[in-house]
Image (cartoon, rainbow, N blue to C red):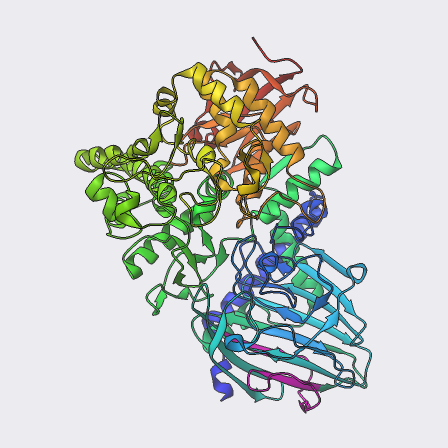
């Protein structure tokens, strides 16, 4: 049985290469005296309130997110498995979401405990909704600490100190017990949110190895295999714990002489063999401090992709915590040998890393454009990931999680992302990508069938919920596709999808000056409340006032539709001061300035629309307001869900003075830089430096902008300007330029 753990030569080679690279990276960091960017990160920011961020140990974009698992994970504010307000912990699981509005994962839960003082709780629903009893311990935040790559906590209830760290595909647990007899519960029942296990297995392979798998259904249907090795031999199984025996096993250890028990855990979505290979390649020994140092070095390399000169320590902390949170998702999904579980349920091989946790409706707006500036490797891997998913399921991803298409959120967001990557030169086979975008945009589902037949989604024909949002998101994707078709000389596709991208105009009511649902005969859906922002109404996470601005691909037409520059400006002004109707807002419509809702992604580009009508100073005012009033240096952290890095990416880009309004190949608009200086590592050995002369909390207005010494007349620069390297200089002042 133990033969499945034998390691072949390619994995021994991979292990040696991994160690050499890691040691070299750590030595370089020490010898060069480089900044420790991880010291500026506070992972607790966003761990309370509605932030929903993952809290625990991980590597940048790693497969494993190893952290505490709390008892309230059926509640909305526990989507990541943790909320700072909670005072109980039931273990430490190996997979977590970050910042999402739905809960899932929480796979393979370990709980160290003293078998002689068991504490149980029955409040958590177990498999298929059944009541289960769980071991639990009181969580004292004064005894808890978290840094990038490291989580520690003391659990006095069980006399155990816990340290957790990770590699990309494996977790390392260190438990120090005070008792002579100790145990570790391995729970394959418990997950996060509404997901429930449907199949599982567990076996003790030999005195120091166990393995198992967990297949579950929930938001995503997925499977996780794991292989674990312990630093001490297993003594036996405990019969003194009170939990669901059919889903969990408590292993006992003799800690009379050696109080420390370590556990190495490799995971895979493919097989036991791959989980074992991941473990062997990435955790060849028991040196906890070395593994943590390697994780820390990885974080420092990624965090240092933008080096800033902040105004103060708080700003530095917010910025690098945002960088940290923007690099938890997407998460790695392929094993060390390149295998991964595909969207068709089969195992596949890929040359590029494959990723999951693709919250594309959120992240196409800022997170993925940020990757194209500072992470060429991720941008290239996303192309491969998107195309492989397309080949496996017949359409580009919508909200992909652990090989499963959740179909969550409206529109065709991967079309937007892939188009942006095509336009920026990351796609080698553009014709294949264009074909994938076209086929994904012509399927008779998600409202597209009505757009094809009627030119929009009529309320009375479709019976679609949130139909206005659906159509307007499709319009952005259609415009993105049309650009790639034009670039490729596909005149027919460019014209067809270009025309379809104007479908949003069907919803504009000139009498009320907002978009709203309408019927096929042209009549408006009634009753209608433009302030209503509830799930499954006409709009997704927003209302008519917010969605009227959701035309980032065709701002000039939107300006004309709203009556020209002056009327457009006046409407923007009123949008930011109108506080009516908030009693009609859903719980997740947050971060409000008037009707603007920064906690919801459809609002994210709106402040930058001022630039298009010659009022950059008004853009600057609102950008500074959002940066300073809606991002917090406390547990709440952000004014809405982190949404897999989108909220943080908006902060990062806006803090350095830039934002890409048109998400497919659009220029980067100027806002109001919050830092004194930012140096971006844009790849290819080049850097792009942004300097804000005379910057302060009072000097928020751009007086002049220069690119490589040349004065700019506009309020934006191109992607190519940034990737070419150089210097962008802003001269800041306390008064707007007339």
Query: In the rendered image, is residue 441 in sight?
Result: no
Q: Nearer the viewer, residue 113 or 131?
A: 131
Question: In the picture, residue 341 is in which quadrant?
Answer: bottom left
Residue 467 picture location, percent across and down: 35, 45
Residue 421 picture location, percent across and down: 38, 41
Q: Nearer the viewer, residue 7 or 628?
A: 628
Residue 214 picture location, percent across and down: 49, 76
Q: Residue 241 in magenta?
A: yes
Residue at point 64% right, 83% down? 243
Residue at point 71% right, 83% down? 183
Q: Is residue 646 above or below residue 196?
A: above
> What is the span of residues highlighted in magenta in the rendered image?
225-252
Q: Is residue 512 above or below residue 56?
A: above
Q: Residue 539 in magenta?
A: no
Query: Is residue 464 left or right of 96 when viewed as pictured?
Result: left
Residue 676 picture location, percent across and down: 66, 27
Q: Nearer the viewer, residue 5 or 603?
A: 603
Question: In the picture, residue 630 is in which quadrant?
Answer: top right
- Name, please, the residue furthest toward the top: 738
Tally of numbered discs: 0
């Amino acid at each position: 049985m133990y033969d499945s753990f034998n390691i072949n030569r390619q994995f021994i080679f991979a292990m040696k290469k991994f160690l050499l690279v890691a040691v070299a990276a750590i030595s370089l960091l020490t010898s060069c005296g480089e900044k420790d960017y991880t010291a500026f990160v506070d992972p607790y920011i966003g761990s309370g309130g509605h932030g929903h961020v993952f809290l625990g140990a991980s590597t940048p974009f790693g497969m494993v997110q190893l952290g505490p698992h709390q008892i309230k994970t059926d509640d909305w504010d526990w989507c990541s498995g943790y909320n700072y307000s909670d005072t109980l912990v039931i273990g430490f699981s190996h997979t977590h979401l970050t910042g999402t509005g739905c809960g899932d994962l929480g796979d393979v839960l370990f709980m160290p405990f003293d078998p002689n003082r068991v504490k149980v709780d029955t409040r958590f629903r177990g498999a298929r909704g059944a009541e289960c009893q769980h071991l639990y311990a009181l969580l004292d935040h004064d005894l808890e600490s978290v840094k990038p790559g490291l989580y520690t906590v003391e659990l006095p209830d069980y006399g155990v100190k816990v340290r957790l760290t990770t590699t990309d595909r494996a977790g390392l647990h260190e438990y120090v017990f005070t008792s002579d007899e100790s145990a570790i519960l391995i729970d394959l029942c418990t997950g996060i949110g509404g997901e429930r296990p449907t199949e599982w297995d567990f076996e003790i392979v030999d005195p120091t190895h166990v393995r198992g798998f967990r297949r579950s259904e929930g938001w995503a249907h997925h499977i996780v295999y794991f292989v674990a090795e312990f630093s001490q031999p297993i003594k036996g199984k405990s019969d003194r714990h009170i939990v669901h025996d059919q889903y969990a096993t408590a292993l006992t250890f003799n800690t009379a002489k050696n109080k420390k028990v370590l556990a190495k855990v490799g995971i895979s979505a493919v097989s036991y063999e791959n989980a074992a290979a991941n473990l062997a390649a990435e955790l060849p020994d028991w040196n906890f401090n070395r593994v943590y140092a390697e994780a820390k070095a990885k974080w420092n390399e990624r965090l240092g992709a933008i080096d800033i000169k902040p105004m103060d320590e708080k700003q530095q902390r917010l910025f690098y915590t945002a960088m940290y949170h923007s690099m938890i998702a997407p998460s790695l999904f392929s094993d060390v040998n390149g295998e991964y579980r595909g969207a068709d349920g089969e195992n596949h091989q890929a040359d590029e890393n494959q990723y999951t946790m693709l919250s594309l409706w959120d992240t196409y707006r800022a997170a993925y454009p940020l990757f194209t500036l500072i992470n060429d490797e991720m941008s290239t891997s996303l192309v491969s990931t998107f195309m492989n998913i397309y080949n496996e399921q017949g359409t580009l991803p919508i909200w992909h999680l652990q090989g499963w298409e959740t179909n969550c959120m409206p529109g065709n967001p991967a079309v937007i992302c892939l188009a942006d990557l095509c336009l920026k030169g990351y796609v080698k086979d553009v014709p294949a990508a264009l074909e994938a975008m076209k086929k994904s945009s012509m399927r008779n589902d998600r409202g597209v069938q009505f757009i094809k037949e009627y030119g929009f989604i009529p309320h009375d024909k479709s019976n679609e919920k949130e139909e206005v949002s659906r159509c307007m998101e499709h319009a952005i994707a259609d415009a993105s596709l049309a650009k790639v078709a034009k670039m490729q000389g596909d005149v027919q596709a460019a014209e067809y999808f270009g025309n379809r991208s104007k479908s949003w105009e069907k919803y504009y009511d000139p009498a009320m000056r907002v978009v709203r649902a309408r019927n096929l005969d042209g009549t408006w859906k009634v009753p209608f409340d433009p302030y209503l922002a509830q799930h499954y109404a006409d709009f997704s996470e927003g209302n008519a006032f917010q969605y009227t601005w959701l035309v980032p691909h065709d701002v000039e037409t939107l300006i004309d539709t709203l009556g020209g520059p002056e009327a457009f400006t006046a409407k923007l002004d009123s949008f930011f001061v109108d506080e009516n109707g908030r009693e009609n807002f859903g719980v997740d419509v947050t971060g409000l300035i008037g009707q603007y809702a920064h906690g919801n992604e459809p609002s994210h580009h709106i402040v930058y629309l001022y630039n298009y009508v010659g009022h950059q100073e008004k853009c600057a005012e609102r950008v500074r307001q959002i940066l300073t009033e809606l991002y917090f240096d406390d547990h709440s952290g952000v004014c809405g869900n982190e949404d897999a890095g989108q909220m943080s990416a908006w902060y990062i880009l806006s803090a350095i003075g830039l934002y890409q309004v048109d998400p497919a190949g659009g220029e980067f608009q100027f806002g109001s830089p919050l830092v004194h200086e930012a140096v971006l590592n844009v790849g290819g050995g080049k850097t792009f430096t942004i300097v804000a002369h005379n910057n302060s909390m009072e000097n928020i207005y751009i007086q002049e902008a220069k690119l490589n010494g040349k004065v700019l007349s506009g309020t934006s620069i191109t992607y190519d300007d940034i990737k070419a390297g150089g210097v962008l200089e802003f001269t800041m002042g306390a008064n707007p330029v007339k």
